[in-house]
Amino acid sequence: MSMASTSGDKARKVEKAAPGKPAHKRRFQRYGIDLRIQVKMFQAGQFLSCWGRSTELGEDGIGATLTGELVSGEIVSLEIPLPLSPYPLKVRAVVRFRQGLHYGFEFLTLNGSQKETVRRVCQMLAMKS
């Protein structure tokens, strides 16, 4: 950390990100999870889909390695077969991070029931770690 001056005599802490790491702090803890997910997107005038494996899950998003290519900011539909749920979680998400074929998605449209399911799965994963 370094100190940066502000107006006046006070100083504030400035977090410096490690090379290749985001400079922001996550709102929710992430937990390792390996699930087969499906990603649906609209590219070049047509609907496409690809498969991938999740790497981590948080209450606000999921990380995954995919078989297809996406761009940062792209909106997609995800189908995630979460434990503790009889049906796959179907949710819209935005690509927030990309490194090679690994992507970070932020959930956009979770309803109350979906939020509760994701929260319970995260709690279960926290107990296992």
Image: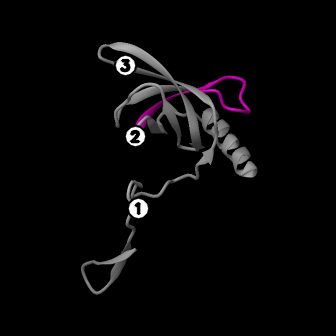
Residue 28 sits above or below residue 95 on the image: below
Q: Is residue 121 above or below residue 18?
A: above
In this rendering, the answer to whether 29 lies above or below 53 is below
Whether tag 2 and tag 3 are in contact, CB under 8 A, the answer is: no
Relative image position of residue 64 (x, y in whole percent) = 52, 36
Q: Residue tagged by mark 3?
A: 42
Question: What is the three-letter code of the residue carrying label 3?
Answer: Phe
Residue under numbered circle 1: 18
Q: CA distance from mark 2 to mark 3?
A: 18 Å
| Sequence order check, earlier mark of 1 and 2 | 1
In this view, the residue in front, 9 or 40, is: 40
Q: Which residues are magenta?
A: 80-98
| Badge nearest the viewer, 1 or 3 | 1
**For this rendering, which residue is in front, 116 or 1?**
1
Please give the name of the residue rendered at 43% of the width and 34% of the height, measured from the top-left corner.
101
- Residue visible at 66% across and 45% down in the picture: 122
Is 82 inside the magenta-drawn segment? yes
Is residue 60 a member of the stretch shown in magenta?
no
The amino acid type, in three-letter code, at marker 1 is Ala
Q: Mark 3: give few (<14), some (14-19) or many (20+) Cα within 10 Å.
A: few
Q: Position of residue 99 (x, y in %)?
A: 40, 41
Report the amino acid beneath label 2.
Arg
For the residues labelled 1 and 2, say whether their Cβ atoms are less than 8 Å apart.
Answer: no
